[in-house]
Image: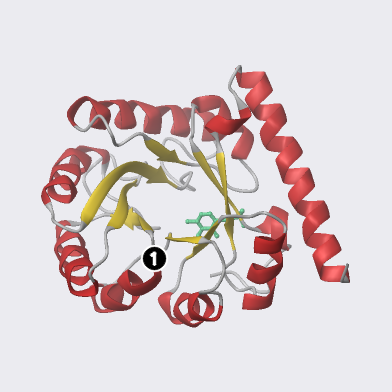
Amino acid sequence: MSDRRAELAANLAHVEERISAACAAAGRERDEVTLIVVTKTYPASDVRLLAGLGVRHVAENRDQEAAPKAAECSDLPLEWHFVGQLQTNKVRSVAGYAHMVQSVDRLKLVDALAGAAARAGRELGCLIQVALDAESGETGSRGGAAPNAVAQLADAVAAAEGLRLEGVMTVAPLSGPYAGRQLAAFERLMEIASCMRAEHPAANMVSAGMSNDLEEAVLAGATHVRVGTAVLGVRPRLR
Ligand SMILES: *Cc1c(COP(=O)(O)O)cnc(C)c1O
C-alpha cells in the first residue's frame, strides 16, 4: 500500500468510527448516514485512491478544479456532488459531470441548471442550500437562500424538467444567532427539511455536518455528511 493510500485508509476508518458512534448515540442505524468526501484542493490521484477504498460520493466546490478532476476519474464508480457557490456561466460545465448540485440558492440558478441539464440530456439532483445566517431575507455570506425563500425555490426545482428535488443542505453559520451553535443550526435545518417534505415527500435528503461538526449533524438527523479535512488532511490554503 502506498503511504498516501495507507494514510487515507486510516483517516477514513477514523471518520467511519466517528459516524458510527454518532449514529449509535443518536439511536440511528449506520446506513441512514452517507459519507461524502470533499476532495477540493486534492488531486485526482487521491480521488482514485478513495474510490479504491470504497468511497462512492465525492464533492467539489469550484468548477475550474472539479471539471478536469471528474474527467480524469470518469472510469470510477463515483457520484459527484457540487457544493460551492455556483455562477450561472459555470452551470453548463457542472451539468456535464455532477450528479447532485447541493448549492441551489436562487431562481436564476434553477433556470440555468434546468436549461443545462436539458442540453446535456441529464437529470440533476438538487438540494436547496439554506443560509441560517440570513433569516432576514438576504443571501448568506457563504451562499445559500434565506429560510423564507426555500419553499419557492423547492417548488421551482420540482417543476423544472431535468431537475430532481432531493432536499436541503447547509453549512453551519459563522455569524448570526447560530454561530457556534451547530446542533441548534442543524435542528433548524431539520425543521426546514420537514416543511419541504410536507410539499415534496420524496425530498428527504439532509446534507449537513463537516469535519468539525459531523456528530452534531448526525444527532440532528442529517442523511449526508460532507467531510474533507478529516479524510484528506488540512488543505494547503483556505478557499
Ligand atoms: C470544504 C467544504 C466541506 C468540508 O469541510 P471540512 O471542514 O474540510 O470537512 C463541506 N461542505 C462544503 C460546502 C465545503 O465547501
Specify the quadrant of the image occupied by residue 115: bottom left
> Measured along the vertical axis of the image, is residue 221 above or below residue 97?
above
Q: 105 or 95: which is nearer to us?
A: 95
Q: Find the residue positioned furthest to the top.
A: 27
Please report the residue visible at 46 percent of the width from the left and 33 percent of the height from the top. 186
Amino acid type at circle 1 is Ala
Report if the beta carbon of the residue with label 1 is closer than 8 angstroms to ligand 1: no
Q: Is residue 103 left or right of residue 32?
A: left
**Residue 97: percent from left, percent from top:** 39, 71
Q: Residue 162 location, x and y as percent?
A: 19, 59
Name which residue lies at 30% across and 45% down: 134
- In the picture, the quarter occupied by the N terminus is bottom right
Residue closest to the eye, 86 or 155: 155
162 and 154: which one is in front? 162
Looking at the picture, does residue 132 appear above or below residue 107?
above
Q: Is residue 181 visible?
A: no
Q: Position of residue 164 (x, y in %)?
A: 25, 49
Q: Is residue 227 visible?
A: yes
Query: Viewed as shown, does residue 70 lie left or right of 5?
Result: left
When asked about the image quadrant of residue 151, the answer is top left
Q: Which residue is mark 1?
A: 98
Element carrying mark 1:
loop
Q: Residue at coordinates 66% horizontally, 70% vertically from top-left?
A: 48
Check disc 1: other Cα within 10 Å, few if <14, some if 14-19, many if 20+.
Answer: many
Percent coordinates x, y for residue 110 in the rendering:
19, 59
Q: Quadrant of ligand 1?
A: bottom right
User: Quick check: 97 left or right of 1?
Assistant: left
Q: What residue appears at the point 26 percent right and 54 percent down from the top-left corner? A: 105
